[in-house]
Image: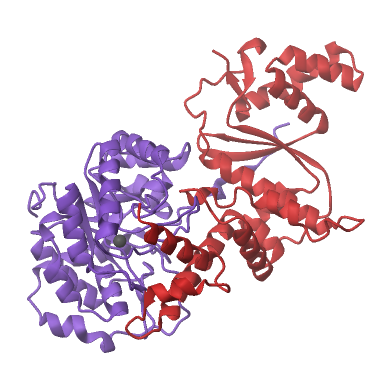
Amino acid sequence: MSAALHDLQRWMHQALITPDAVDPAIANALLPGHRLIASECLAIYQRSYILRLRMCLGEQFPATRHALGAPLFAAFADEYLRACPPSSHSLYDLGERFPTWLTETRPDREAPEREDWIDFMVDLAHYERELFRLFDAPGFEDGPWPTTSSDDRTLVLQPCLRLASYQFPVARYYQDVRADRSPAPPTGAPCHLVILRRNYETVTYPVSALHFRFLSTLQQTQNIEAALADIAQWSRRPLNDVTASWTADVRAAWIEAGFFARAQ
Amino acid sequence: MPAANPAGDPALGLGVGLRNVHFEHILRNWPAVDWFEAISENFIDSGGRPRMVLRRIAERYPIVLHGVSLSIGSTDPLNVRYLRRLKRLADEIGARWVSDHLCWTGVLGLNSHDLLPLPLNEAVLEHVAARVRQVQDILERPLVLENPSTYVRFRASTWDEPAFLRALCEATNCRLLLDVNNVYVSCFNAGSDPLAYLDAFPFERVVQLHLAGHQHCGTHIVDTHDRAVSAQVWELFRIAWQRTSGASTLLEWDGNVPPFQTLHNEVLHARAVIGGASKDSLATVAAVDAEAINSAREAASTPIDFLLPAVMSQRTWSPA
Ligand SMILES: [Fe+2]
């Protein structure tokens, strides 16, 4: 490996990430262009670097960008990209660390009271990342899917499904942004969501706290009977009632919505 | 069109870059386009709709895979996992060939997502040639490398790009993708002559040509892939196409992507250019001042297709 090439690449890449602190060594390595001096030539790469990544991050978080407004989102994006420069070969991974980074660097992290709007941003960013990831994650399109007549013992949560809880109605807000309805920031209202992909379509289902607990237990145990027993104990209702409610109220709808895979 | 180019690969005709905004149109209308070029990175890790769509399109059209993250010139080790996945995808869709750029995209484990230029000299040739061999061993096929658009010149360069690529081909038996827009952009920015570039280019290694639009900023040109091909680039294409005896030709359009038919019509314009009367090449190509200088704000150079999932189809629904 060429040491000179390695140094040059280190300098040039650093000049892209921190354009305001360029190592003079890189300037010495460059010749002027036809009509631009060397630093102006380098500046074309520097401008493109941040423009491209900022735009790409914005497209991965359209609702967060809407909520923050484009200028503030750009400021967050620039900070994030400087703190976490991309390392993956895929631009799909660009926003992977963005929600966590937002959480860790939230401006009120030292303050005694957390600010609502920041909680909302963090929630929304997490939700958007989840959608984005699920869209292209390994899927379960080829099944096997159960039918309503499948035995409970064969029902397990399908692999392309996530359970997530938020303090704000992020799914509704996201939908409104996507439909160009320019929603105002919502007020806090805890929500429990099932996010899944079926037939290459990513769908979000809001569920009650009880249903969410049931599905979370099911995710751990992959056993309907055990999850029903847990709900009976937690809700202090007779197991028969809980089982009857499962059978009558949600079972068929959830099977049809693609919550379950049929265990082999 | 001829059945094969001098490198022995089949000539595919006039194709366009596969962009996600056109997925629906293609699946519904199966347009009469000769072939598609798919950006490798948009599909190699895909477990969702993009890969399914690509598989379906590959059943009907020849597909070529065009990468942007191989980083053949980086001093970081090659990403073997990436290469294995790339091979799996190429095999799965029967890719006619696999291309990437003569560039580096990052170092120290980071990726700039830009196609960064290399100084061209003996040491770099040795470095790149060794890596091309490694890539070809893993992919089990020749690698096709494209001349990038460049905006800087290095003091450490002792070779020009055509000579470097010629030597690289001789050392590794790799093939070339000649992007005539990149020739125009790089030559303008460096103050060199694009016709002299073509005169020195090893056309016998070329399997494919790229066409694209650029943004002329007066003092420099940015490779934006966001508009129609300029007259100067069409003229370079005419010359290059003749010298390759009709290499597979592809139009790249990544920003402000127009409706599919507009894109297709733009590449079909190549027919008129190929069949057209020979113009005064020097006058056309050198007519830089006559070209509209775009005073709009400089766009990002776009070597990458920002294929982002259409999560638009996401719904919220209450089942119970
Ligand atoms: Fe190209």
Q: Is residue A38 above or below residue B202?
A: below
B158 or A112, nearer to the observer: B158
List the single residue furthest toward the bottom: B289
Please tell me in which quadrant of the rendered image residue A213 appears.
Answer: top right
Please name the colour scheme applied to the rendered image.
by chain
Ligand 1 quadrant? Answer: bottom left
Q: Residue at x 7, y 76 (%)?
A: B278
Which chain corresponds to the colour purple?
B
Please tell me in which quadrant of the rendered image residue B94 appears.
Answer: top left
Q: Is there any visible trace of residue B12 in the rendered image?
A: no
Q: Residue at x 29, y 73 (%)?
A: B186
Quadrant for the C terminus of chain B in the image? top right
B111 or A74, nearer to the observer: B111
Q: Is residue A60 above or below residue A213?
A: below
Q: Is residue B185 above or below residue B107?
A: below
Quadrant for the N terminus of chain B in the image? bottom left
What x and y, as percent, mark residue B188?
A: 28, 79
Please tell me in which quadrant of the rendered image residue B316 appears.
Answer: top right
Q: Is there any visible trace of residue A27 in the rendered image?
A: yes
What x and y, as percent, mark residue B35?
A: 24, 50
What x and y, as percent, mark residue B76?
A: 42, 50
Which chain corresponds to the colour red?
A
Judge left or right: residue A256 versus residue B100.
right
Q: Residue at x 54, y 63 (%)?
A: A55
Q: Is residue A96 above or below residue A248?
A: below
What x and y, as percent, mark residue A63?
A: 66, 57
Counting the numbered discs, the total is 0
